[in-house]
Image (cartoon, grey):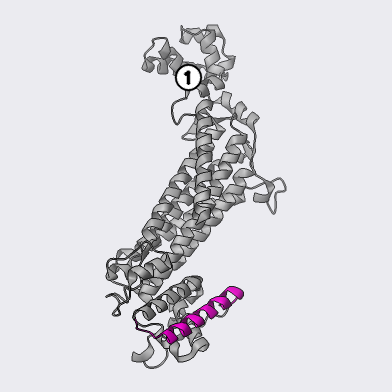
Amino acid sequence: MKLWGGRFSGRLDPLFERFSESFSFDRRLILYDLKVNRAYVRELGRAKVLSAREVRALVRGLDAIAREVSRRPQWARQPSSEDVHTWVEARLQREVGEVAERLRTGRSRNDLVATDTRLYLKDAVRELQLAAVEFLDSLLFQARRCRTVALPGFTHLQPAQPILFAHYLLAYFQMVSRDLSRLENCYARADELPMGSGALAGAAYPIDRLRLARELGFARVSRNSLDAVSDRDGVAELIFTCSLTMIHLSRLAEDLIVYSSPAFGFVEMGDAYSTGSSLMPQKKNADALELIRGKAATLVGRLSGTLAVLKGLPLSYNRDLQEDKRALFDAVDTTSDSLKLAARVVRTLRVNADRMAAHMAVGFLTATDVADELVRRGMPFAQAHEVVGKLVRWCEQRRVTFAEVSASDARRIIPLWDAKLAEVAKSVPHSLAQRAVVGGTAPSRVRIELASAGRLVRQWRRRWLRR
């Protein structure tokens, strides 16, 4: 069955038919397609375009298809249709007979697929938001467990300053919180009804699009039929948001891969999320994290491909837009699975506070604190920075730490050196406590941020579970 065959003769080349079919992936929209068709048929009835008898027959047939699809997961095992819309119409004809030919009155596959896609986008956003909230909850779980554990902080992957491990985890909380905000923006922009736009010029029948929007759960209707059938901003936007979320997860994955290596030993992955080597019996590989990192790269490629498809399309609809579904479905599936997997990895991490503490002494992470103490005694910071740097170089040459340098040796470089400076130089708790500004790593500040983050997670969970 073709929905466009009257003006053609003969059969399509089988290669072209295989090349152009989309049923193998857009069948995922089946329940949305049936929902939109039911609402549209009812609207045609209210507009007196269809009789009450025709409306009842069509709705009954669409409901029967929906029940069949829900009961039989393998309903589309052998695709034989060009797309999901063609399959629905062919199946409806078998269900209700000739009246099925009235289903397409005043509408096009162009506005139908645009509407199906927007309904899918809205549901996908909610699914992603709930997965993101569970990931954030796992970060909080681990942060609360390790709220007193100090971690060597790095810049350029070189030792920098002490931070709390909880503060480190809350950095990723902030990243994914921004992703949640972007998802909410995606939802708001997708919440617009294209149905009634026809192929490009608008419907020729007096349907009430505002009423149709309310029935389908849209906040508003599109204002331009040309734009409505060719607009895929929502698709590109969601793929971008998924890509950025995956980049955030990939950064976390990279950190934990490094931190779990024996050279660091800060954390250990749970066995359930690691694999071994077929040759080397001792290996424990962080494969779950490596796969998240790899899939992030694939998704960035999907985004580039989607934008490239859109960049040169003349108005209005073009068949190129068929390609958006593959990228969209893959983006949503990959991101949802990655969020759920990352949540489980984080929740089951074993944190080695002793290894973190051992690394703390090696990199002179309290050097800035020594300079700050000298500033408090009246020395200009530039001068303090200089003399502390010289002390670090002296210690490195002799392979000693701040805790091991003698007072007499230290005073040769820093004449103001005394017991208090020596304590500052070796005290990680002192270093942490000094960073009590909003957003800092001080324990007092991190406690406040943990409480605030916990309230946000509870609020988000309540909001989106209700929907």
160 is higher (above) or lower (below) than 253: above
**Residue most toward the bottom?**
9
**Residue most toward the right?**
281
Bin the neighbour count of mark 1 within 10 Å (Cα to Cα): few under 14, some 14-19, many 20 and up. Answer: many
Percent of width and height locating residue 417: 49, 8
As shown in the figure, which amino acid type bears the numbered disc 1?
A: Asp
For the magenta stretch, what is the residue range? 48-75
Percent of width and height locating residue 318: 33, 73
107 is higher (above) or lower (below) than 135: below
Percent of width and height locating residue 350: 65, 39
Residue 296 included in the magenta stretch of the image: no
Q: On the rendered structure, is 8 left or right of 99?
A: left
Q: Which residue is mark 1?
A: 369
Q: Quadrant of residue 191?
A: bottom left
The secondary structure making up most of the magenta span is helix
Residue at the (55%, 53%) spot, across then down: 338
